[in-house]
Amino acid sequence: MSGETIGSKGAYTLIRAAAVVNDAAFSVESTAISAALSVGDESDYPLLDFKLVHSVTTPTTGDLFHLYVRISDGTDQAPAPVSDFKQTYVGTFTLDNEAPTKSYYVHGIPNDSPESTYYIEGELTSTLTVALWVRGRTYKAAA
């Protein structure tokens, strides 16, 4: 029906390649949203959906990965998160003891600045190898 609100979302794009993350440690910085979601205007969509994919080893039920944003306006960046300065928390992936390769999701994160980057912090019982993916999401009027 014309004028109804419908959802629109892009495809998941890799922003942090699979790498080891240790307990109480942060990953390396992700690709900026504006660089990762460069097709059309997806980097300007107001919401972001994140997907964490673990590989190599099986996590313990209850292992966590916390997602943090490093806000940027395209010129300046907030400091990178570290153990005693975590900056801006945006969500948590809670893992189950599923064998690799399994995906976990955090949806509906505000995309306040497409120049921002993301980090994950492990709260783990063992070292895990994970990758981080993102897609833009918006709502618009139906044609």
Image: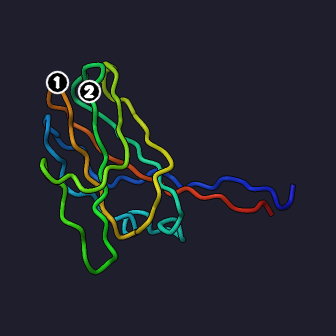
Q: 16 or 120, which is in the foreground?
A: 120
The image position of residue 30, as x and y in percent, is 27, 57
Q: In the orientation shown, which residue stands out farthest toward the bottom?
A: 75
Question: What's the amino acid at mark 1?
Answer: Thr
Q: Name the residue under label 2.
A: 63
> What kind of residue is marked 2?
Asp
Mark 1 lies on a secondary structure that is loop
Q: Are marks 2 and 1 in contact (CB under 8 Å)?
A: yes
Image quadrant containing the N terminus: bottom right
Q: In which quarter of the image is residue 130?
A: top left
Residue appearing at x 33%, y 47% in the figure: 132
Q: Residue at x 44, y 65 (%)?
A: 112
Which residue is identified by label 1? Answer: 125
Q: Residue at x 16, y 24 (%)?
A: 125
> Which picture quadrant has residue 81?
bottom left
Where is residue 107 drawn, in percent x and y? 48, 45
Could you say whether the residue bearing mark 2 is in a helix, strand or loop? loop
Classify 2 as above or below 64: below
Residue drawn at x 31%, y 66% as measured from the top left? 71
Q: Which of the numbered marks, if any, corresponds to residue 92?
A: none
Q: Who comes first in sequence, dot 2 or dot 1?
A: 2
